Image (cartoon, rainbow, N blue to C red):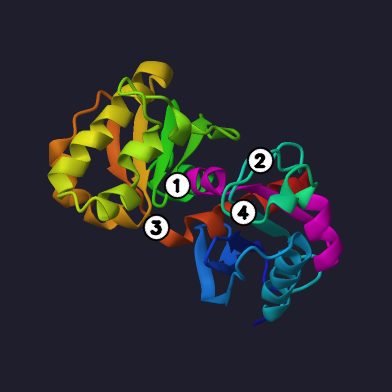
Amino acid sequence: MDQKLANVAIGVDIGGSGIKGSVVKLETGELIGDEFRIPTPENAAPEVIADIVRQVVEHFDTSVDTPVGVTFPAPVINGVCPMIANLNQDFVGMNVSDLMTTHVGRPVVVLNDADAAGLAEAEFGAAHSQDGTTIVLTLGTGIGSALVRDGVLVPNTEMGHLLLPNGLEAEKWAASSIRTKENLSLEQWATRLQDVLNMVEMLFSPDTLILGGGISTRFAEFSGFLSTRADLEPARLFNTAGIAGAALVASQEAQD
């Protein structure tokens, strides 16, 4: 790769099963070349995860000045992780931004994975150029969320933990993993998802609702069972949204 490529950044997406990254073209959110992925070791210590991030970044032949953004599967408040479900508990209370910066050897911006996906959809995807309030729900093992108002992220929303009238958390009732686990038809699952969308609309009154995660590729099959006041759209960036969003935020912070 040409080390002098302008207007690019590196995005790295930390997941429970794999840590993947790519160079991102910031005008469009497109990945330049293939993703590079390393499996996530089970219950790995924070330093091990940070070293894998370093390997992913060093895989790409870019300038040391190229901004680096990393998504993290937990809230991130001023760089610090206050709680986490799917990685080692030693991350709790740790400044993850400082950890990544130290291991990678250059400034690294860390943000919540759903927030990164939401920003990418707002900038490059289904909510591009739309004013008002956009909410992105990522439907997977759990339910992640991102709230974007006129292009500005309100970070660390956790709508997957909203308590529904049936007494269950949203993600315990309608995550995509629940559909698989309970062998629900798409119609049965959509009925549950409707309960979540009703709660989200009551609390946040979004103008646009975007459904992401792998199940969004089947949006046409289940969207007919859903009814919302907000415009309802499938995610367009799919599994590249986190990488694109992390790169975008890293670039923005590098310019501040």
Residue 67 pos. (x, y %)? 73, 60
Q: What whole-number distance in Å separates the C-alpha atoms at marks 1 and 2?
A: 25 Å
Question: Which is closer to the viewer, label 4 or label 3?
Answer: 4
Q: Residues within 10 Å of mark 4 (few under 14, many from 20)?
A: many
Residue 125 can be seen in this image: yes
The residue tagged 2 is 83
Position of residue 247 relative to residue 154, above or below, is: below
- N-term-proximal mark, 1 vs 4: 4
The residue tagged 3 is 238
Q: Residues within 10 Å of mark 2 (few under 14, many from 20)?
A: some
Please identify the quarter of the rendering in which residue 256 is found.
top right
- N-term-proximal mark, 3 vs 2: 2
Does 109 lie within the magenta span? yes
Tag 4 secondary structure: strand
Q: Amino acid type of disc 1?
A: Glu
Q: What whole-number distance in Å separates the C-alpha atoms at marks 3 and 2?
A: 26 Å
Q: Amino acid type of disc 4?
A: Thr
The residue tagged 4 is 71
Between 185 and 227, the one lying in front of the other is 185
Question: Which is closer to the viewer, label 3 or label 2?
Answer: 2
Q: Amino acid type of disc 3?
A: Phe
Q: Are marks 1 and 4 in contact (CB under 8 Å)?
A: no
Q: Which residues are magenta?
A: 97-118
Tag 2 secondary structure: loop
Residue 59 pos. (x, y %)? 68, 80
Question: Which is closer to the viewer, label 1 or label 2?
Answer: 2
Residue 131 can be seen in this image: no
Q: Give me the disc on residue 37.
A: none
Q: Give me the disc on residue 121.
A: 1
